[in-house]
Image: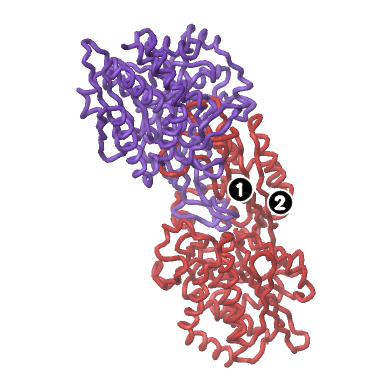
Chain colours: A purple, B red
Amino acid sequence: MQKIKNILSKIDESSDKNIEILKDFLKIRSISTIPDYAEECNNAAKWLKKLLESFGLSPLIYESEGHPIVYCEYISDKKDAETILFYGHYDVQPVDPIELWNSDPFTPTISKVDGEDCIVARGASDDKGQVLTFVLAIKYLIDEFGELPFSMKLIIEGEEECGSKTLPLFLGEYKERLNADIGYVCDTSMWDKNTPAITRSLRGLLSEEFEIIGPNRDLHSGEFGGVAWNPIRVISNILANVYDESGAVTIEDFYDGVKKVDEDIIEDWNKLNFNEKEYLSKIGQKTSAGELNRLIFEKTWSRPTFEINGIFGGYTDEGTKTVIPSKASAKITCRLVGNQEPEIIIKNIHKFIRNKLPEGMKVNFKGFDYCKAIEFNTDSQYFKAASLAIEEEWGIAPVYTGGGGSIPIVEVFKSELNIDTVLVGFALDDDRIHSPNEKYNISSYTKGIKTWARIIYKFY
Amino acid sequence: MQKIKNILSKIDESSDKNIEILKDFLKIRSISTIPDYAEECNNAAKWLKKLLESFGLSPLIYESEGHPIVYCEYISDKKDAETILFYGHYDVQPVDPIELWNSDPFTPTISKVDGEDCIVARGASDDKGQVLTFVLAIKYLIDEFGELPFSMKLIIEGEEECGSKTLPLFLGEYKERLNADIGYVCDTSMWDKNTPAITRSLRGLLSEEFEIIGPNRDLHSGEFGGVAWNPIRVISNILANVYDESGAVTIEDFYDGVKKVDEDIIEDWNKLNFNEKEYLSKIGQKTSAGELNRLIFEKTWSRPTFEINGIFGGYTDEGTKTVIPSKASAKITCRLVGNQEPEIIIKNIHKFIRNKLPEGMKVNFKGFDYCKAIEFNTDSQYFKAASLAIEEEWGIAPVYTGGGGSIPIVEVFKSELNIDTVLVGFALDDDRIHSPNEKYNISSYTKGIKTWARIIYKFY
């Protein structure tokens, strides 16, 4: 017991130093979706390698065509030692619209947000801050014990925000070495700033982009207005018709494989401290969109969605241009749940779009990508260890929540390596991940490190 | 008679030189809608002033906050001389999408298009090439006669493509001096490359831009998908509902003031050499959009439209971003006909949009602008002089057509100066005005100059 107390004290004492480490990490512009930032992704991987080496570990960098993966293996001498797979990502989302940031996204800034000390930068919460909670916890445990209590396989990739193309290659090549009993991942949220959470399910993701082509060139709306098929009108009509009046998605068989939510889960949800009006007002809304007569939790954790993430066509610069454009495009993503089959859904989306095209108009699909939804059995010792450790640190047992977002790797761990994943995270709903002014609370960061220290300590 | 023959010969002999003059004019990047090109607009005005001075005329440049106007007055000594108001514009449309141009838009290039010699550049047809047809004709007449047969008020403005803000100020200040009997404007098309046309009506234009605001910031679609109101979904729904199944516009009272087309006009239309299938295939379409069961001529000349000229929202860069954006915007224009009242229509458009907003969402209107539709009596001596001169040059009488586009100045000439306008132009439907690879046929240019020479000659 003294050892964990020592460790926790040391973490508290070195809080400022740990913040400086996070700042260093956040300064690296590792935006994975924009090819121009490839070198910055390399730099982030090198930075992590160096950090892990400073703990006495021997990380390596796995490279292929995409952004590199940092991999660090530690084999315990202990007989029957468990093997834990840690996972996180060093890549971050693009920063646009840049004009809405109050400070430079890659110049980490400490400031108060709603009275809490926070670090503001792109990636602060998703996922660099979270990654460092378990990476630094590992350091403190090694410092104290001279060893880890389990074998460890640690993966930090650089393509989580852009579809993880390299990871399957890596998992293919390293499959034997990646044998593990459980995955621990830090990329999820707390219930609120006082209530920790373990995520028991994650929605899947299906992405596609398409372009509607009308006239063979941009036309003058005076000359051809009234006769030319305007692709913006057609794409608007397609997108408007994706939803019926109840907010349900009209794509054929879209809800096949969507399960009714279990009663006991609904019971858990009803126990959560939750104020719908307050929740909506935080995002500037008076009503909830989506399907009528469903709980917010159900909508965001257990129901699929069809979202339009981007639309563009015609003249978008300053002033007026009387043009009927030749093309209009949209980027869409679906959140998937239960046993929804992405391959069937994308086929039906393509069909839906084609069926709505006036004769002679064309559509180009840019290529889809997906990961399936996933749900875990939370009865194992690994969930219990995490749950206990969390309760010790936060003074309250974690609530089991659903995850609205997708962490494709978790589905891959299940299908490729046959392991479940314990999703423990210290992000908060107002962290503005993927948005301007992303932040991570200093308390999330420091208590996050301590939580992971307590979890790891349970394996000695 | 000998004099006009001399003039026409001289025009033919100096064809190459006249092409060089047009090339010089086209090299000036006078894009009026983009503020960065303001200096280029000044340069175009100065270039025109110098050209007119070289004819022995005394042009001046009228300046205010917008792009300057070139004004050139010539007062005839003749008793009872008619006064002719010429009008054209030196500004051009933006060039995007630049990647679709086969040559630089501001490096005029002579090339064959469908077997015809053409000059390719932004503004070749709209309106720099057309402007020079009457400007150079004036030069040849002055050279031959030492004087013009009428008093002349010549206006070449630089804001036709961006709403002509300076012109009303100019017309206000110069109202007394601008007294005239008729306007002659060269900014319209031939019926086809062998058949000249005089435009007897023009549609009006109403423009607006609006922004739909949903969540108070960009949201993560995993976290909030299913609950957040996506403004792209809402704007798509608004725009899709602007049209009913027959293609008619559903805005309240939109068709008030739209007249049934006169039988004799339909008779004229039916005489025109026109192949609908060929016309549609030229723009890459198999069917005609817009209102069902109406002639193409009616749709483009005598019916109003609602067009979406641009749409943008969310993530539009490369790759996927799982964002629910805070905002989405659209730029729209309506073509107006008959006695449609723009002020009433815009009020109803605003109402239509507001009525389609889910509770708590907002709309910002950027500010509308308009000009009304117009129709002329074609029985006056000025129309007849033009018609005769055109027939002499082209060997065929001009057809009277409608104009689908708007030339706001013509409405202003009517309402402010109380004069009709004779719209004679040599553009062709395939000139790609407002599109990449805009061109003007060399024959349009040379025969255009000769046509104007013949028209002016009728006044001696």
Q: Are marks 2 and 1 on the same chain?
A: yes
Q: How many marks?
A: 2
Above or below residue A251? Residue B27 is below
Viewer-proximal residue, B27 or B89?
A: B27
Q: Relative to residue B402, is residue A202 drawn left or right?
A: left
Query: Where, by quadrant of the figure, is residue B451 drawn?
Result: bottom right
Q: Relative to residue B287, is residue B144 drawn left or right?
A: right
Q: Secondary structure at mark 2?
A: helix
Residue B342 is labelled as: 2
Q: Earlier in the sequence, mark 2 or mark 1?
A: 1
**Gap in angstroms between the C-alphas marked 2 and 1:** 12 Å
- Residue at 27% x, 23% y: name it: A153
Mark 2 neighbour density, 10 Å: few (under 14) some (14–19) many (20 or more)? many
Location of the N terminus of chain A by quadrant is top left
Kind of residue indicated by mark 1: Phe
Q: Which residue is mark 1?
A: B306
- Residue at 27% x, 27% y: name it: A57
Residue A381 coordinates in the image, percent (x, y): 34, 8
Residue B120 coordinates in the image, percent (x, y): 45, 69
Kind of residue indicated by mark 2: Pro
